[in-house]
Image (cartoon, rainbow, N blue to C red):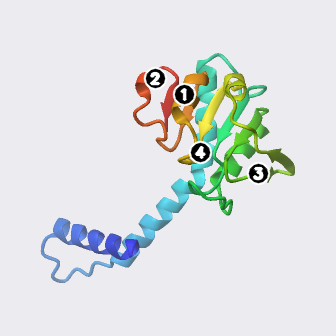
């Protein structure tokens, strides 16, 4: 349904831009395929971008990724479910661990994950865990997580899902959004 709407919107937009299309055949399928390919490429590069941004944020705090404690909040593919299939969180964790970060995770729906042959167990989301993290990275915005508590206890939060919306006043200097 979304693709059909996109195709229609693209067709209408292209026809409007071209004006009179007599003699010009507009193949919206080609345009839609191009848009779909670009979206796929952008999505596939997002874990790399997130890992890179984590490194930049740590550098702002005069820390290297290597040796930093990185807490990932949410590893499931979508919020409020346990489905791990095609979860980009696994790629983010792989890249951060590959750069020497000490990665831990909390996800109320996932008890353990395996990334690059390493088994990670779900950590309890405690005040101590949040305080010990050099950065907390929100990758899946589960509704049952206490985001005000996370912002209050963490030294730095990188929010890729806008889970901290409305909490900027609590920690404007420590929240960075994607």
Residue under the point 48% across and 22% down? 171
> Between tags 3 and 4, which lies in front?
3
Answer few, some or many: residues within 10 Å of disc 4's Cα (few below 14, many 20 plus, some between 14 and 19): many
Query: What count of labels does the image hold?
Result: 4
Q: Which residue is mark 1?
A: 151
**CB-based contact (under 8 Å), mark 2 and mark 1:** yes
Label 2 and label 1: CA atoms lie apart by 7 Å
**CB-based contact (under 8 Å), mark 1 and mark 4:** no
Q: Quadrant of residue 48?
A: top right
Residue under the point 86% across and 47% down? 118
Disc on the earlier residue, 3 or 1: 3
Q: Secondary structure at mark 2?
A: helix
Disc on the earlier residue, 1 or 4: 4
Q: Which residue is mark 3?
A: 111
Q: Secondary structure at mark 3?
A: loop
Image location (x, y in percent) of residue 56: 60, 28
Disc on the earlier residue, 2 or 4: 4
Image location (x, y in percent) of residue 85: 68, 63
| Relative to 122, 81 lies left or right | left
Label 1 and label 4: CA atoms lie apart by 15 Å
Q: Which mark is residue 170?
A: 2
Closer to us: 166 or 50: 166
Answer few, some or many: residues within 10 Å of disc 1's Cα (few below 14, many 20 plus, some between 14 and 19): many
Q: Which mark is residue 28?
A: none
Residue under the point 67% across and 45% down? 92
Q: Secondary structure at mark 4?
A: loop
Q: Which mark is residue 139?
A: 4
Image location (x, y in percent) of residue 150: 58, 30
Answer few, some or many: residues within 10 Å of disc 2's Cα (few below 14, many 20 plus, some between 14 and 19): some
């Amino acid at each position: 349904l979304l693709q059909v709407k996109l195709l229609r919107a693209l067709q209408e937009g292209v026809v409007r831009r071209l004006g009179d299309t007599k003699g010009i055949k507009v193949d919206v399928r080609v345009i839609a395929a191009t848009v779909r390919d670009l979206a796929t490429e952008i999505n596939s590069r997002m874990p790399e971008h997130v890992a890179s941004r984590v490194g930049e944020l740590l550098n702002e705090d005069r820390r290297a990724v290597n040796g930093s404690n990185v807490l990932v909040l949410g590893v499931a593919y979508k919020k409020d479910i346990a489905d791990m299939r095609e979860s980009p969180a696994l790629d983010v964790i792989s890249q951060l661990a590959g750069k020497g970060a000490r990665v831990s995770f909390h996800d109320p729906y996932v008890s353990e994950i395996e990334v690059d042959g390493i088994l990670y167990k779900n950590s309890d989301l405690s005040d101590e865990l949040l305080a010990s993290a050099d950065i907390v990275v929100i990758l899946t915005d589960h509704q049952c997580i206490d985001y005000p508590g996370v912002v209050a206890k963490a030294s730095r939060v990188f929010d890729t899902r806008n889970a901290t919306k409305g909490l900027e006043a609590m920690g404007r200097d420590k929240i960075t959004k994607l």
